[in-house]
Amino acid sequence: MSVIHTDKLTRRFGDIVAVRDLDLEIGAGGVVGLVGPNGSGKSTLIRVLLGLLKPSGGEATVFDAPISHPSAYAARIGALIESPAFIPSLSARTNLRSLARLRGISNARVDEVLEVVGLRDRAREPSKRFSLGMKQRLGIAAALLPDPELLMLDEPTNGLDPAGIVEIRDLLRRLGDEGRTVVVSSHLLSEIEAACDTLVMIRYGALLFSGPLRELVAQAGECIAAVPEHLEDVERLAAVFSSAGWPARVGDGRVVVTAPASTSAEVNRAAAQAGITLSALRPHEVSLEEVFLRMTGEQSGDNGRPAGAIGAEIPTTAEKSAKAKVSA
């Protein structure tokens, strides 16, 4: 079953294309990570799907209903956009009861969602006493009030300390395991890697990848980490491997070579022939962050889009195939 489907979905702001010809399909169940550099269009995409922004072109459906009529699916969705806003002097429970009354939801459901997010013991406290992490959990509780089949969260871990990030990550994982479809945007790749089943990666509003996380990492190929005995040899070692036909990159005092582990002996010989002694040579498991930087570049989207954003050609896997499917 398709929960979200887009066909050439586009959203422009003047000369900037925030979402560009996006073809996407997200199935039911599990946690889907929506990632991309800052300014890549993640928040805009979420707002368009929620009916908060009108698309400039293309089409999209949520639960098979067109996004031009969000009232057809609003009751099946919970959302948290940016930082949650509550009345500081009111307790967590009272804040949620006010929201529940507006949507015709019982007070019993309020206590249920407080339990889900781990705030039932703090329900009587005014929200102004809550930490940022607790406020984020309270925001997720508000999004869960209608018992949604689809939960859309925009940067729910933004600004949290490590403990708060772990709390939110574990909560998202539990919600996904319950059978809900959880779409979460984030720039914290380690948390996406830990919490998500599937991934949607965009850059400048264009699709770079859509599918199971393991497939994306597998696309990077096998790698070997070579550590020279002398740190000053790192750059020269990378040049040796590159000239031998092995893509190589430098980081943390080592050279990561894109080559299968079976070629380790050849890699070692190439270093020795160049007069470089290795202190370590081991298989290297590519992280999501490494793959992300390879595909998106190291520059943040906040630093500006390519010249001629509307007509700019940005190589993507979406342009090589008619559709990209997420099988959550």
Image (spheres, rainbow, N blue to C red):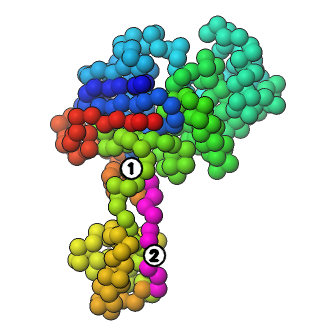
Q: Quadrant of the C terminus?
A: top left
Picture residue at 37% right of the left edge, 78% below the top:
264
Residue 318 shows which numbered tag?
Answer: none
Q: Quadrant of the N terminus?
A: top left
Q: Kindly report the distance in space between the C-alpha atoms of the residues bearing marks 1 and 2.
A: 22 Å
Name the residue type under label 1.
Glu
Q: Residues within 10 Å of mark 2 (few under 14, many from 20)?
A: few
Picture residue at 53% right of the left edge, 13% below the top:
75
Which image quarter: residue 238? Answer: bottom left
Q: Nearer the viewer, residue 30 or 113?
A: 30
Which image quarter: residue 144? Answer: top right
Label total for image: 2
Name the residue type under label 2.
Arg
Q: Is residue 162 magenta?
A: no
Which residue, given by chain and number where applicable, does mark 1 sit on?
215
Please, what secondary structure does the residue beneath circle 1 have? helix
The magenta region covers: 279-288
Which residue, given by chain and number where applicable, does mark 2 sit on?
282
Residue 73, compared with residue 270, is above or below; it is above
Upstream in sequence: badge 1 or badge 2? 1
Q: Position of residue 9 (x, y in %)?
A: 29, 26
Residue 311, compared with residue 139, is above or below; it is below
Which image quarter: residue 105? Answer: top right
Q: Is residue 116 visible?
A: yes
Q: Nearer the viewer, residue 89 or 286?
A: 286
Q: Residues within 10 Å of mark 1 (few under 14, many from 20)?
A: few
Q: Nearer the viewer, residue 183 or 185?
A: 183
Q: Position of residue 296 (x, y in %)?
A: 33, 50
Circles 1 and 2 in contact, beta carbons < 8 Å: no
Q: Position of residue 277 (x, y in %)?
A: 40, 90
